[in-house]
Amino acid sequence: MTNLILLGPPGAGKGTQARLLAETRGLTQLSTGDMLREARASGSAMGRKVAEVMDRGDLVTDDIVIGLIEERLAAPNGKGFIFDGFPRTLAQADALGALLDRLGLTLDAVIEMRVEDEALVRRISGRFSCGTCGEVYHDRTRPTRRPGVCDVCGSTDLRRRPDDNPEALRNRLLEYYKKTSPLIGYYHAKGKLASVDGLAGIEEVAAAIARILDRA
Ligand code: AP5
């Protein structure tokens, strides 16, 4: 069983790599961003509550995201979990540690994906994804093979995220540096941290992550 955290700023490629790892290793991707977007789309009370916060690029409160992860971890998975976009604060990291302990699970690796701000802006401004299966694309670096049609499921419902605009992105980056980047030191002190160059191509980043997991 392998449990890992993908840690990095918005646009670092966490979702892209998590989906590849789910495919190649059978791990379960737990993306709090995706869960919150699903809650929004469902129109639930929680979804309505978080919509504005997400659109501004602020972090949703710890209790909400910890609750979402707690629910998903309760469903057993033999192969392991990829935490994508969680934890994002020290309180979330402590809560995850306590949850894993309670379930008798271990955290095998925390992989920091390093990407400079200029590249993040380029990535986020070109991103779109499939509204049906969630596959993530980029206008320049990962276009669909047929324009307007998802490679994976053939859907034509391709969308851009409301928080992928310059103002919200500035705020998301600020939130990352203020509240999430302290987790780099936190996991380094626990001996769990490894880093990859997230500026490399998608396949190269995947290979670097695979090397880390194979020796974890
Ligand atoms: P979330 O959905 O987690 O967004 P994020 O962290 O801002 O990360 P992104 O999804 O933008 O980027 P990514 O790293 O997954 O990059 P991707 O693979 O798509 O969170 C959204 C919001 O929800 C938050 O702002 C907050 O409000 C709330 N939230 C979520 N979790 C929370 C938590 N734990 N606590 C509190 N609030 C929470 O790649 C980006 C683009 O680059 C794509 O187009 C892709 O094709 C391309 N790309 C990827 N890798 C490469 C590469 N190696 N080379 C070239 N292009 C690449």
Image (cartoon, rainbow, N blue to C red):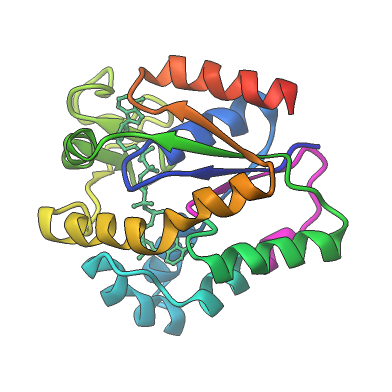
Rendered position, 203 above or below 96? above
Q: Residue furthest right?
A: 104
Q: Which contiguous range is marked in magenta?
A: 70-85
* Residue 75 vertical placement versus 81 (above, below): below
The residue sitting at 69% across, 49% down in the picture is: 190
Identified at 14% across, 54% down, the residue is 165
**Residue 156, image quadrant:** top left
For the C terminus, give its image quadrant.
top right
Identified at 59% across, 70% down, the residue is 66
Q: Residue 41 at x, y = what percent?
A: 37, 66
Left/right of residue 25 with respect to residue 129 in the rendered view: right
Q: Nearer the viewer, residue 184 or 89?
A: 184
For the N terminus, the image quarter is top right
Most foreground residue, 12 or 164: 12
Along the horizontal axis of the image, is 112 left or right of 5? left
Is residue 8 one of those drawn in magenta? no
- Image mark count: 0
Residue pictured at 22% horizontal, 62% vertical: 171
**Coordinates of residue 108 in the picture (x, y in percent):** 73, 40
From the top left corner, tell me how far across and down residue 202 is, in percent.
40, 21
Q: On screen, 56 above or below 194?
A: below
Classify residue 109 as left or right of residue 103.
left
Q: Which of the two residues, 150 or 138, is positioned nearer the viewer here?
A: 138
x and y percentages locating residue 56 in the rendered image: 22, 69
